[in-house]
Amino acid sequence: MYVHDHGSKRVKAGLVVAMVLCLGLAGCKNSNPVDILVHVIVSALNKNLTDNSVADTQTAAPSTSQASANSDSSAVTSEAGAIADSAVSTTSAAAPQEEASAGNTSSTSDNASTNGGATGQTDTITTSSSARTFIHPGLLQSQADFDRIIKQIAAGSEPSVSGWQKLINNRHASLGYTPRPVSIIFRGNDGVHAQNYALLFNDAAAAYALALRWKISGDPAYAIRAIKVLNDWSSTLTEVDGTSDKFLAAGIYGYEMANAAEIMRGYSGWSGDDFARFQTMMLTIFYPMNHDFLVRHNGAKVDHYWANWDLSNLASIMAIGVLTDRVDIYKEAIDYLYNGAGNGALNKTFWKVYDGGLAQVQESGRDQGHTTLDIALVGAICQMAWSQGDDLYGYDNNLVLAGAEYAAKYNLGYDVPYTTYKNSDVTQTAISEADRGTERPIWEMLYNHYVVLKGLDAPNVSAFAAKLRPEGGGGDYGPNSGGYDQLGYGTLLYTLD
């Protein structure tokens, strides 16, 4: 961990306060003086870093719809009280030191299917120096995000409350959820092993939903359950295997599991040893596969794999870099997004820019399920980088927004321009109508960043966000892998005041 010299007075003051607290609470049964000392030190450091970062939060949109309560709704009253209490004084805790289905209800695999990207331009990398210190939590959500969300729920603000209802109504956010870890995950039909990757994508969705419920309500019961999911997998999983689809599993579920763990690293009940074991799992099982795919592309031509293959592995690399405080890993993802050889480089994912704020997506001639998956993955990548002060959203004159507008407009039923796409495998002369209208909980994040925060015009992204508001999470958009390719809950998580 790198430490800045800035704000030394704040840190010294924090040390004095910590010492006093430790002495005063040394005799308390449930208080650990060392934990208090660590908490104050890290809080002081993080406050200093936050003051000197560009990090901000975004996304979500106003809505009036409210989800109905389910069997978990009895928890609303007690949790609402806890949230209101939290809103008065929120603190950040110290840190212990697929391809997706083409559409929402099918479960098809790519298995090295065709495509690649047109040559994209390079860009000067403007990330912070390698001596940076990561902000924690700092992936899809930062502490500032959670502080805002808690205040919105406590105030009964819409559409945040409706978004909260979507979370607590999801079965993955229930205290009764039981994880099902296995030693080897198989994705892709290799003719020998039964595919079992649904176990992992369900448990990743649960770990994230339970982590959110704890972080927002403050109820430790949800923290304990989230930690059980994470610990069960880190103590069991030894390998991710299958056909070439194994790289999709390592990418999508890698970034999703890392996001759950990044939230839970602030829970004092997660032991340092258990957290370290989880980090080791990410570094020794997921990251090597992510890295290998971007370097070798499974032995295929560099333009062979569709954009979502690169993007899923980039999302995992970025998330693992932050989770494990590995600046080199995080920077690997940033560098590739700017200058990578494969279709996950931003100028290859959005390879043809048109007048009117539109950019053709690399998979538009394939089908709309995967086109919207590209938007889902790029959005997650941009948001994670934003939490660390890196603005991929604004790259190349808001290129990501142009791509999102293109995908949203066509999937809302409107015509868009199309240019014939060619790579070493295919020539696609027309945009594909397959899976047109695919719904994914991905638009609130983009809407709130570009429209609410930045004040930009995004009529199609805005319309899709309004159509799906309030957004749900894993399992709310179909039972197969396509419904779990993104973590969701955008209305709750990204609505800005």
Image: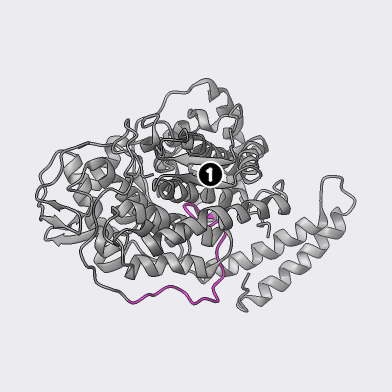
Question: Which residue has dot 1 on it?
Answer: 150
The amino acid on which the numbered mark 1 sits, given as a three-letter code, is Ile
Front-most of 284 and 87?
284
- State the image quarter where residue 359 is shown: bottom left
Neighbourhood count class around disc 1 (C-alpha, 10 Å): few under 14, some 14–19, many 20 upward: many
Looking at the picture, does residue 3 appear above or below residue 379?
below
Q: Can residue 497 be seen from the camera position used here?
A: no
The residue drawn where x is 36% and y is 49% is: 445
Q: Is residue 238 left or right of residue 375?
A: right
Looking at the picture, does residue 454 appear above or below residue 200?
below
The residue drawn where x is 39% and y is 48% is: 244
On whether residue 135 falls in the magenta region, the answer is yes
In this figure, which colouring scheme has been used for the structure?
A: one colour
- State the image quarter where residue 422 is shown: bottom left
Q: Is residue 70 left or right of residue 299?
A: right
The residue drawn where x is 58% and y is 49% is: 261
Front-most of 415 and 115?
115
Per the rendered image, the range of residues in magenta is 124-142
The residue drawn where x is 82% and y is 62% is: 20
Residue 492, given in percent of the width and then of the height, sits at 44, 41
Residue 253, given in percent of the width and then of the height, sits at 47, 46
- State the image quarter where residue 395 is shown: bottom left
Residue 171, given in percent of the width and then of the height, sits at 51, 28
**Outermost residue toward the right in this view:** 27
Secondary structure of residue under mark 1: helix
